[in-house]
Amino acid sequence: MLLEDFQLQTLINEAEVYQSQGLLEESKEKYLSVLHYMTDDNRSSDTYKKLIKTVNVRIEKIEEDIADFEKIDETPTLSHDVQNLIQKVFSFSQTKEMAEVEGVLALAKFGQHEQALVEFHRLLGKGVAPGVVAKHILECHLALSSSEAAISQFNQWVANGLLTQDDLLDAQSFLETVLRDKGIETSLPQLDHTPRKKNRTRGEQRLALDIYSLKIQVDDHSEGLYEIDFDVTFQSNDTVSVVIPSEKKTLLDRFHLGMSLPKIKFYTPRAVFEGNGIVAEKTEIKIGPKKGDYVLDIKIKAN
Amino acid sequence: MAFFNQKDKVIECKIVYYGPGMCGKTTNLEYIFRAGRSYATTDMISINTKGDRTLYFDFLPMGIGRIMGCDVKVQLFTVPGQSKYRSTRKMVLKGVDGIVFVADSLQIRKNENLSSLKDLQENLAEQNMDLFNIPLVFQYNKRDLSENGIPIMQVSEMESYLNNKLKVPFYTASALKGNGVSDTLKKSLKLTLRHLQHELRWAN
Ligand SMILES: Nc1nc2c(ncn2[C@@H]2O[C@H](COP(=O)(O)OP(=O)(O)O)[C@@H](O)[C@H]2O)c(=O)[nH]1
Ligand SMILES: [Mg+2]
């Protein structure tokens, strides 16, 4: 009898500690083993009857707590401060624009789709990675289980010309696939399938970029040799893109197709390295907030 | 992937506290925040559910001061331990530089420690990182519970089922009382910074 009391006490002690540690399943199991441990003879004694009652009450309470935890809102709306924090600490790219996209994507991943939508629209308004951002906007609508909103957003883009034809086609095929998987029948507007320039489909760019800025030597006849810093906006394999604003006409004129650029400094998070490059493309941006600016593609050549 | 600003000589790294639910990760950070308030650069931020369970993460940024000519900052994170929050753990692990694996010494949580370690290995692998190659420290927590007559595992038992292949440094701890918390963190920082120094060659 004494030994039995001691063993019951040990079980109850464990059950209590586990409960206080938030280990609810473990605690419940210990309480259940208290009940199992009692033999039929001792069940009838008054002390044990009381104990059984206490243990049953505790088990009930634990079961309630477990049920409560299962009911919690797994994607609560977070405060603005925390949303800002998430954007800041979950962006890793050294390229400012890509880091911004990553930060907003993190918001979406943490269930903050409403705020992510606001932020993605802001980025799209600034002309940041339109192809990528457009798809994320559609994803946010779909995550908020609003296929209609996604469709009407797409129709708006078709009408307002904020996206290039390539980006629209990308967004359309993305949306069509998702809707088809969901078994939703709609007909999206017919788009003009002009030949796509494969090398500028930004939707396929990887987000993690290595080179975040460049220093290029420019030989100015009047001022001599000087260096200019550029932020890299995109990188794919051995080509990086930088934007030259339309105001900097003289700077723009210094670069022509096929021109070799010696001794470029490439800044990466790991190191700065030097190499040569060649101007592979120079294109005017025809649409969106950066309309009129130029994109310079620089192909990096191994030393 | 630590952030390294070459121009201003600032290095920012990320250490994640990993481990099964309720093993004491948040308690570690709370203790660090209380004891090392002078190093904390802002308040600790916890995204919890009711009952103080971590839903997304805890976050505590700290400034360590200058090390080998660089201003060193560290972000401490915890993950939610329950198995259903795997995708959140993957998010929090992004860009991690060092890991503290908090194992629960309670006998009854033996299997949970192992599943959590496997989960860590898989999640690292998904971002092309290797458990055997990342700065890692074990902490065997809740040692104090033996005083309450609760069955806990011997250190040798924990070493042999968690750390016999990895062979990384370990500390015993009672995070609730603060024992072993700062030793664990210091070791993790040391390993992480040494690793980064090698990778980034910041102290050239
Ligand atoms: N006795 C004891 N309890 C601890 C210790 N560390 C954490 N706890 C308790 O374990 C429970 C879960 O801790 P928490 O830090 O929230 O765990 P997490 O899920 O890993 O973040 C809480 O009730 C803590 O008070 C410890 O060293 N000793
Ligand atoms: Mg926690």
Image (cartoon, coloured by chain):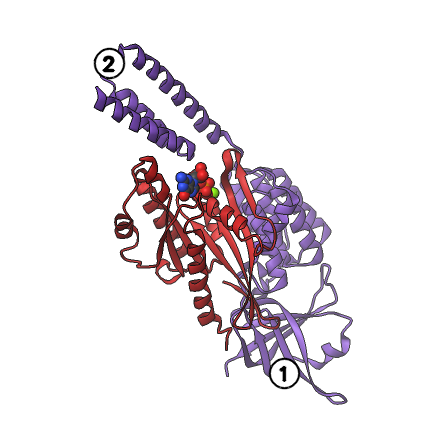
- Which residue is depicted at the point 55% across and 42% down? B47
Left/right placement of residue A53 relative to residue A138 reads left
Q: Is residue A245 above or below residue B39?
A: below
Image quadrant in which you'd find residue A213: bottom right
Q: Are marks 2 and 1 on the same chain?
A: yes
Near mark 2 (Cα within 10 A), the count class, few <14, some 14-19 or many ≥20, is few
Image location of residue A230, percent across then percent down:
66, 73
- Which residue is depicted at the point 44% across and 44% down? B177
Image location of residue A188, percent across then percent down:
62, 44
Image quadrant in which you'd find residue A267: bottom right
Image quadrant in which you'd find residue A42: top left
The tint chain A carries is: purple
Q: Amino acid at mark 2?
A: Asn
Give the residue number, with chain letter if any, for mark 2. Answer: A42
Q: Which is nearer the N-term, disc 2 or disc 1?
A: 2
Q: Is mark 1 within 8 Å of ligand 2?
A: no
Comparing labels 2 and 1, the label whose residue is closer to the camera: 2
Q: Secondary structure at mark 2?
A: helix
Image location of residue B199, percent across then percent down:
45, 70
Count of numbered badges drawn on the protein: 2
The chain letter corresponding to red is B
